[in-house]
């Protein structure tokens, strides 16, 4: 029941925030904050209450559309719990960031933010494939509006591009889900979308591969995986800061989660056959993203490519599919959510101060905003994989795990870590270092901004130095994967 | 006493954190920064006392702080390991750092990034101490990257000049190239042996691999890659001369006394692996020998005082590599220690000189300072002699003679390496005295602006004392290290000369260098300029001056192609293919749109045509 | 009393239909287009009568009556529209009716 | 007699009777509101009666079964919505208003007859009643050039296509000797006396007639012009009721005559479906006239429904019906917005009329957005579940190629819906003053729109009740 509340609270909060916005805009912001905090409290309560209660911490199951065997089946395990907390955390930050930046249609903005969060939570919690798809698509529309309404100059194009990419891949997944559903029916005579029932549906290798590719298409676009990534930089270049945090930080985790929860358990054989290709794509993505990040002048675009590069590790880790690499991939998702979220936040703060997203218009900011610059430096370092921060732990484990079976991939990907140096340091150099050419005098971090970023720094360092509790929480879900291939 | 070990890296780390976050007045900053390192130093000295007085079981002490991660068989701890080797490194690092911090409180006093400077410096010390105390390679890697980071931050400390930032970036990237190799080495080690705990590795490796086995060689070479990067050895040495863009105390601390020797520590720490991989060990020796010669030649031609010292550092670390490569393990560590003393001192002296002369770096614009800056002159002279190896008195001579002897007599030693080392002595002596003569003798070119205060002079004096006295503890030093790093001896063939003969030869060569330097610089300066003017000399000079044109080569081999690829890829070619799809659908739209002409009869014709086609389909299908 | 075979009736209907269709496609005057449509409808009607006679059922002829009725209704509406159209455009040329589309 | 014939045909009779009553009322005294009120009453009565009347076969011409009644209810409800929209729309326009409702009722009656028809004669009669009503409705604003032109075009093309239909029926009749749907299946199955070279061309010609009404490619050419030219409420009628009635008939014809047994016919269906999906979605891509966009999109939507039809079986039929319901809701909603926004002198059909609507009339814009997203098949809307149902039905029979094309074309289609949405949400500062001045939405129209939006979302989230009804309806069909 609490699981349902997790989603409902957000939606109610969104509607409320929308309703009051015209009268009292500020209240709308606070309602959003309270709704997310309430959710966070619920999630933490679940965590404390049931952490050692076996694989599923909580479940809830209702009939939804019985004619199709569709259930409203929610369940939470350690992996979902962590990702839910991450989602709410980043969501909270997105609301905080928008405090100054969003001044038009405030209510609708918060409605959309909360709806996206509800959709993401739905993805993490659903154990019914129809519900999963439903939530998956539900993230789309609010995100489209967020880009469209509060974006920059070319937002319409970016928003449509985002929508088209995700929609076609989503529909391919829908076909795949239905194919699986039908295949299951043919064998058992039961129509069901229930995850547990569909596991182990006997499929011919060809069918299994086709269906798996359908799922993969959706995940690949959303992660995003190498040749399907081009929507992300465009969207990030146009969208507002809070949107970008969700776009790059959270949507990717839904894809990673989908692979771990659905792709591998449902199609153990097909994924194994497909793994080399996926890993090649991952490695290309790592290098390609890093290279393109190197030459970007738009800060958001740079971060988007950097993010593509990092998410290559997630794909690599998942498809290398041994205990180390999968856990590394999950850790990378979480750490990436935080560090990329923070980088986008910083980019947003820089934009708010300098009035531009172009690196060329920034230089020597350390002179005038030392604290902001220092924090920027910190997250740039996190991004280049400096030990002691969460990103390093994740990427190191991915590589360590990948190295076992796929030496070449690991070595090339390790070079990708090296390539991250180039763009991260270029960012620091161009934005913060150098002479203060434009003689800017800008306000340094405000209390609220400093607090938000401080929390993120602490989180990242915690993940870097004492990640064991986190590993412990999702160990069950992640350890499950390698066993599938045996 | 030993259980306080964790405080040694923790105190500087905490202090760095405070300095980074809290805004404090200058006095407090200085006090906090120095006190934290002092505390570390005192604790490490107490630990040393305790260690010597009552050695722990197995002559080693492990302190597990907490379990870092535990992921299916991979469970590195955050744990410290103290044995004679790490103890020596810890004490030297802490103590030299303390002196340099003290020196910096005065040196940096006018800088507006005072607090930031000490935050970085403390962070550096914490990282370095973590590196040497780590009980597993992952934690070592953390410290390893940490010092790399601090090096980057401190080289680019004066960020307003983009050149400094670029130098920092270069240092970070080049060392990280090596680190990538190191990391791959870690993957391979873990895959093969299932642990990254150093002691476990050293115990298991000889049982799993036979001497010369492929995996052992691969691991040794990969780790060597990391060491070469961090220690600025061939072929990754190019970053160190540029690193002199940082404040002088930074050069003293990081790019002379401590960080660059991390590679030496790594190889010494994992010497078991190198014993299993003779070819890799031989590579270490060859790299060391080649580096010490190449850097020596380059040092001869430099104008910038700090660059001379930088090449000298590369060269001296080359000696340490040579020692490691031939199996003269304790000699390498001993040279690390003496080098830390005299090279730190040289840099501190250089800092005094440079600050005294209005940030003048060119040695040809200096001169005649010996009576203007007497303390600096005498300490610099002592350090220089130690560097060049003034026999019987200076610490440098003792350590270098030991290495020379090792090059001839240790397990992997050979006459060739010994000769190379001897030539190195000549070069060292030459460039050292060229520098000293140009800076302190001859005519005064630039007037003095500022005289050093006590905080800058006391560290110099202490280091000067150590640059001499450090040499006399060679015997107890060797004894202390024996269990961890035993001296190896050559068995295959007889050594052609004795230790005394080797030392004598080194002494004579030192003298030769001194005389030559005196002759060319003070006695007949015209001769040296004539040498540089003749075409062959000029070409050679330019070649050496530019560090054997390696920067030039790398620029063309790596930097430009990478930037070029990045630039042409900027627009994301993949996106173009999607644009193609969009164009395709647009074409479809255009074609279909033209059918919607609004003409009634055309519409009717289409209906009729469609019907006829369908009739044909049903009839003939 | 072996009447005309059905196929003849169908062919006649088909020919009428084709003539009507040709008129529809080739005539430009809207009034003549309407006439052509009547011809097409009558072609269909003839086909119905022929088919009805094959099965000796009244259905074919009943259908023909329905067609006549519907055609009459259609024509009445059509003529009304044509009048409006002519008043506005001053022509009954079908190809001028391009206010929509292009 | 009464129990056997009158009661079961009550829904039809009520509509027919209302048209007579309205005519008489007009004769007595012209009053727009009275005519409107009577129409609404009659349609509501017909709608309600559809729930109660017994199921019966009326002779051989009409079958009043759950299936037919379902569509009668749907058509009646849609006609009410159209009437409400027309009321506000006509009130602002010149000329007599009352006859509109008579024509509306007659055309509605035609569509209802189609929904119950199980015989070619009733098919023809229903079609003609529907069409003749529509000609006048389309050209109703007789002082304006565009509606008249549209009326003429529709008339010429519809009349000629019904000639095709009739000739096709004649051929089928000539071959089989019956015009009853279910008999056709029996005779075709028995296989005696069959000349396939008469029957199959006959079916093809019939498909021309039906395809024209449904605006399926390649019989779709009229759609954009008529949509554009007709008054907005009439366009809504053409788009929903006329097509809905026809599709109800097609589904009955298809399943009772077992067209799925004729593989060449299935090929034709596939070609038509694929061509419709491509043509509709591609044509709309860069169109700037909203009514034309909706016209093209309706072509594509009929293509999707045709996919479900072709798939056949329980799932296919269910998908057809569900999708039609969804299509009714979203199309009516979209045209409701167009109607509401139309100024006196013309229809609000340019995309520029919609720019920045969100900032001027947010609720209207959000309603329109919901309709467009539903047309695009986005979750939380009924359009999503409709598409899901079709794809599920397709997957169940392994029609992978068709559903893959459906997915691809509907993604192309997404583009133009989003173009409109982008326009709706464009910032106020960027929009010119060209947009219509701020007006209040008529309460009745607002009610229609909000009911449609709520139903759209409600059925998108909880489709179960509707599914239950649909399954009962199919039960009698198959």
Image: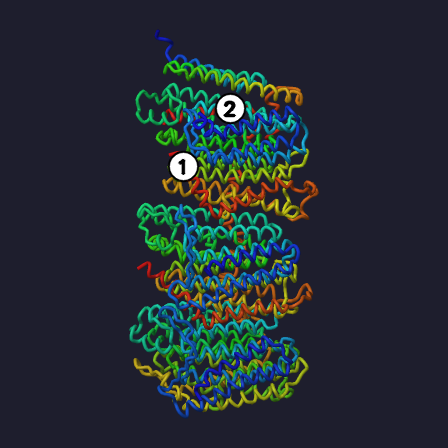
SS type, badge 1: helix
Percent across and percent down for residue D236 are 56, 34
SS type, badge 2: helix
Percent across and percent down for residue D110 are 51, 27
Q: Quadrant of residue B368?
A: bottom right
Q: Quadrant of residue B595?
A: top right
Q: In the rendered view of the protein, which quadrant contains the C terminus of chain A? A: bottom left
Which residue is disc 2 drawn over? Answer: D128
Is there a contact, CB below 8 Å, between mark 1 and mark 2?
no
Q: Which mark is residue B523?
A: none
Q: Nearer the viewer, residue A98 or B598?
A: A98
Task: Judge whether residue A360 can be spotted in this image.
Answer: yes
C-alpha distance separating marks 1 and 2: 26 Å
Q: Residue at x 31, y 24 (%)?
A: D191
Badge 2 sits on which subunit?
A: D
Q: How crowded is mark 1: few (under 14 residues within 10 Å), some or many (20 or more)?
A: many
Percent across and percent down for residue D374 are 52, 44
Q: Tell which residue pokes out farthest to the front in this image.
A: D2
Question: Of the residues tagged 1 and 2, which is closer to the observer?
Answer: 1
Q: In which quarter of the image is residue B184?
A: bottom left
D339 w.r.t. B364: above or below = above
Percent across and percent down for residue A58 are 42, 62
Q: Which of B110 and A319 is in front in this view?
A: A319
Badge 1 sits on which subunit?
A: D
Tell me how the rendering is colored: rainbow
User: From the viewer's perspective, is D349 left or right of D220?
Assistant: right
Upstream in the sequence, badge 1 or badge 2? 2
Q: How many labels does the image show?
A: 2
Q: Nearer the viewer, residue D82 or B509?
A: D82
Which residue is disc 1 drawn over? Answer: D474
Q: Which residue is drawn at 39% across and 58% down?
A: A319
């Amino acid at each position: 029941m609490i699981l349902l509340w997790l989603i409902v609270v957000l939606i109610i909060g969104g509607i409320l925030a929308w309703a009051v916005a015209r009268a009292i805009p500020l209240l709308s912001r606070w309602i959003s904050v309270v709704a997310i905090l309430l959710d966070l409290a619920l999630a933490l309560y679940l965590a404390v209450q049931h952490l050692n209660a076996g694989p599923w911490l909580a479940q809830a199951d209702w009939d939804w559309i019985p004619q199709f065997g569709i259930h409203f089946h929610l369940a939470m395990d350690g992996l979902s719990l962590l990702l839910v907390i991450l989602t709410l955390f980043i969501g909270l930050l997105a609301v905080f960031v928008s405090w100054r930046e969003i001044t038009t249609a405030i209510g609708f903005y918060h409605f959309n933010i909360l709806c996206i969060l509800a959709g993401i939570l739905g993805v993490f919690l659903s154990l019914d494939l129809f519900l999963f798809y439903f939530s998956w698509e539900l993230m789309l529309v609010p995100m489209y509006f967020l880009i469209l309404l509060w974006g920059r100059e070319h937002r319409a194009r970016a928003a449509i591009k985002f929508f088209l990419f995700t929609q076609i891949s989503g529909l391919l997944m829908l076909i795949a889900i239905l194919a699986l559903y039908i295949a299951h029916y043919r064998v058992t005579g039961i129509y069901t979308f229930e995850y547990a029932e569909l596991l182990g549906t006997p499929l011919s290798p060809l069918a299994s591969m086709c269906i798996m590719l359908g799922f993969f298409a959706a995940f690949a676009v959303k992660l995003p995986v190498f040749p399907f990534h081009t929507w992300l930089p465009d969207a990030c270049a146009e969208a507002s800061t809070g949107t970008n945090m969700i776009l790059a930080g959270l949507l990717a985790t839904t894809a990673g989660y989908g692979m771990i929860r659905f792709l591998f358990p449902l199609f153990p054989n097909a994924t194994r056959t497909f793994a080399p290709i996926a890993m090649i794509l991952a490695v290309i993505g790592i290098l390609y993203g890093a290279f393109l990040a190197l030459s970007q002048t738009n800060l958001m675009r740079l971060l988007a490519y950097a993010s593509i590069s990092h998410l290559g590790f997630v794909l690599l880790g998942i498809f290398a599919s041994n205990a180390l690499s999968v856990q590394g991939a999950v850790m990378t998702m979480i750490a990436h959510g935080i560090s990329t979220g923070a980088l986008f936040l910083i980019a947003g703060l820089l934009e708010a101060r300098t009035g531009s997203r172009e690196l060329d218009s920034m230089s020597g900011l350390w002179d005038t905003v030392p604290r902001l610059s220092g924090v920027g430096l910190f997250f740039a370092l996190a991004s280049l994989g400096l030990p002691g921060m969460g990103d390093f732990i994740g990427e190191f484990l991915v590589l360590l795990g990948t190295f076992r079976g796929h030496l070449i991939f690991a070595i090339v990907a390790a070079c990708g870590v090296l390539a991250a140096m180039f763009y991260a340091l270029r960012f620091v150099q161009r934005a913060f270092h150098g002479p203060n050419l434009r003689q800017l005098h800008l306000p340094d971090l405000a209390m609220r901004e400093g607090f938000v970023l401080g929390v993120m720094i602490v989180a990242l360092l915690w993940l870097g130095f004492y990640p064991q509790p986190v590993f412990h929480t999702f160990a069950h879900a992640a350890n499950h994967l390698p066993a599938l291939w045996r | 006493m030993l259980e306080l070990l964790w405080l040694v890296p923790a105190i500087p780390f905490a202090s760095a954190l405070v300095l980074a976050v809290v805004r404090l007045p200058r006095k407090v900053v200085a006090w906090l920064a120095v006190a934290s390192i002092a505390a570390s130093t005192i604790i490490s000295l107490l630990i040393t006392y305790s260690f010597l007085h009552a050695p722990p079981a197995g002559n080693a002490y492990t302190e597990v702080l907490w379990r870092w991660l535990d992921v299916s068989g991979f469970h590195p701890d955050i744990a410290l390991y103290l044995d004679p080797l790490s103890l020596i490194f810890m004490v030297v690092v802490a103590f030299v750092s303390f002196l340099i911090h003290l020196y910096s409180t005065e040196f940096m006093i006018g800088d507006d990034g005072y607090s930031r400077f000490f935050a970085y410096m403390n962070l550096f010390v914490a990282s370095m101490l973590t590196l040497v105390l780590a009980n597993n390679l992952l934690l070592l890697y953390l410290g390893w990257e940490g010092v790399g980071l601090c090096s980057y931050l401190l080289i680019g400390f004066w960020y307003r000049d983009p050149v400094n930032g670029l130098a920092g970036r270069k240092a970070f990237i080049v060392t990280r190239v090596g680190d990538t190799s190191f990391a791959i080495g870690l993957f391979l080690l873990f895959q093969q042996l299932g642990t990254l705990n150093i002691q476990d590795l050293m115990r298991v490796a000889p049982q799993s691999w036979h001497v010369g086995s492929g995996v052992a060689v691969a691991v040794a070479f990969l780790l060597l890659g990391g060491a070469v990067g961090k220690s600025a050895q061939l072929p990754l040495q190019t970053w160190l001369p540029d690193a002199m863009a940082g404040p002088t105390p930074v050069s003293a601390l990081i790019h002379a006394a401590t960080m660059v020797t991390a590679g030496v520590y790594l190889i010494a720490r994992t010497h078991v692996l190198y014993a299993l991989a003779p070819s890799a060990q031989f590579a270490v020796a060859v790299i060391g020998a080649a580096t010490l010669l190449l850097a020596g030649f380059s040092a001869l031609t430099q104008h910038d005082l700090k660059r001379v010292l930088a090449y000298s550092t590369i060269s001296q670390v080359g000696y340490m590599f040579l020692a490691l490569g031939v199996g003269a393990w304790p000699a390498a560590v001993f040279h690390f220690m003496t080098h830390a003393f005299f090279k730190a001192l040289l840099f501190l002296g250089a800092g005094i000189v440079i600050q005294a002369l209005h940030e003048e770096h060119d040695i040809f614009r200096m001169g005649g300072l010996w009576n203007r800056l007497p303390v600096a002159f005498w300490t610099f002279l002592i350090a220089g002699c130690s560097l060049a190896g003034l026999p019987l008195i200076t610490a440098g001579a003792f350590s270098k003679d030991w290495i020379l002897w090792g090059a001839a007599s240790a397990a992997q030693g050979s006459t060739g390496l010994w000769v190379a080392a001897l030539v190195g002595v000549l070069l060292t002596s030459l460039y050292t005295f060229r520098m000293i003569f140009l800076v302190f003798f001859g005519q005064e070119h630039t007037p003095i602006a500022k005289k050093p205060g006590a905080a800058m002079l006391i560290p110099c004096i202490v280091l000067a004392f150590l640059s001499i006295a450090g040499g006399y503890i060679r015997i107890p030093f060797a004894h202390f290290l024996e269990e961890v790093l035993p001296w190896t001896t050559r068995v295959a063939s007889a050594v052609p000369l004795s230790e005394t003969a080797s030392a004598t030869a080194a002494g004579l060569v030192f003298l030769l260098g001194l005389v030559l330097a005196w002759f060319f610089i003070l006695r007949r300066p015209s001769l040296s300029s004539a040498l540089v003017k003749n075409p062959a000399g000029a070409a050679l000079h330019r070649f050496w001056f530019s560090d054997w044109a390696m920067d030039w080569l790398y620029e063309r081999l790596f930097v430009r192609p990478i930037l070029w690829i990045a630039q042409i890829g900027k627009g994301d070619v993949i996106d173009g293919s999607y644009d193609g799809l969009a164009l395709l659908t647009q074409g479809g739209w255009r074609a279909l749109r033209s059918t919607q002409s609004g003409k009634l009869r055309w519409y009717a014709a289409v209906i009729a045509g469609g019907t006829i086609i369908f009739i044909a389909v049903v009839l003939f299908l | 009393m072996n009447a005309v075979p059905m196929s003849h009736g169908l062919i006649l209907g088909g020919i009428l239909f084709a003539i009507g269709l040709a008129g529809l496609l080739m005539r430009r005057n809207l009034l003549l287009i309407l006439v052509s449509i009547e011809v097409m409808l009558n072609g269909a009607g003839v086909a119905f009568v022929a088919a009805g006679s094959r099965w000796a059922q009244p259905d074919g002829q009943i259908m023909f009556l329905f067609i006549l009725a519907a055609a009459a209704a259609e024509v009445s509406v059509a003529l009304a529209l044509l009048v409006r159209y002519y008043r506005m455009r001053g022509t009954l040329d079908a190809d001028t009716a391009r206010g929509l589309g292009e | 007699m009464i129990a056997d014939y009158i009661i079961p045909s009550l829904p039809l009779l009520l509509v027919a009777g209302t048209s007579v009553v309205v005519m008489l009322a007009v004769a007595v005294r012209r009053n727009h509101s009275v005519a409107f009120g009577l129409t609404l009453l009659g349609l509501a009565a017909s709608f309600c009666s559809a729930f109660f009347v017994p199921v019966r076969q009326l002779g051989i011409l009409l079958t009043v079964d759950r299936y037919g009644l379902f569509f009668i209810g749907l058509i009646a409800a849609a006609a009410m919505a159209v009437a409400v929209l027309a009321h506000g729309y006509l009130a602002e326009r010149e000329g007599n208003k009352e006859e509109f409702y008579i024509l509306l009722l007659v055309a509605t009656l035609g569509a209802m007859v189609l929904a119950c028809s199980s015989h070619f004669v009733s098919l023809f009669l229903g079609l003609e009643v529907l069409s003749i009503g529509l000609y006048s409705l389309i050209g109703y604003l007789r002082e304006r050039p565009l509606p008249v032109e549209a009326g003429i075009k529709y008339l010429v093309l519809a009349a000629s296509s019904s000639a095709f239909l009739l000739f096709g029926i004649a051929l089928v009749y000539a071959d089989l000797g019956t015009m009853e749907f279910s008999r056709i299946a029996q005779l075709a199955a028995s296989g005696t006396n069959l000349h396939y070279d008469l029957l199959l061309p006959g079916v093809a010609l019939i498909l021309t007639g039906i395809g024209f009404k449904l605006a399926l490619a390649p019989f779709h050419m009229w759609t954009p012009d008529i949509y554009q030219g007709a008054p907005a409420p009439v366009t809504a009628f053409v788009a929903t009721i006329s097509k809905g009635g026809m599709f109800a008939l097609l589904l009955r014809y298809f399943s009772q005559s077992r067209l799925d047994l004729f593989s060449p016919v299935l090929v034709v269906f596939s070609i038509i479906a694929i061509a419709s999906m491509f043509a509709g979605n591609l044509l709309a891509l860069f169109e700037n006239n909203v009514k034309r966009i909706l016209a093209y999109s309706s072509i594509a939507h009929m293509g999707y429904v045709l996919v479900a039809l072709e798939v056949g079986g329980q799932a296919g039929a269910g998908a057809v019906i569900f999708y039609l319901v969804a299509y009714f809701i979203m199309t009516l909603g979209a045209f409701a917005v167009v109607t509401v926004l139309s100024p006196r002198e013309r229809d609000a059909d340019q995309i520029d009329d919609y720019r920045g609507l969100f900032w001027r009339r947010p609720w209207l814009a959000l309603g329109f957005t919901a309709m467009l997203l539903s047309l695009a098949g986005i979750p939380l809307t009924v359009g999503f579940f409709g598409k899901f149902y079709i794809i599920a039905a397709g997957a169940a029979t392994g029609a992978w190629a068709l559903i893959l094309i459906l997915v691809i074309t509907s993604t192309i289609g997404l583009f133009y819906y989003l173009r409109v949405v982008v326009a709706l949400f464009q910032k106020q500062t960027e929009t010119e003053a060209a947009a219509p001045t701020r007006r209040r939405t008529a309460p009745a129209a607002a009610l229609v729109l909000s009911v449609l939006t709520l139903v759209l979302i409600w059925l998108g989230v909880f489709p179960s009740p509707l599914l239950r009804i649909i399954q009962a309806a199919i039960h009698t069909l198959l």
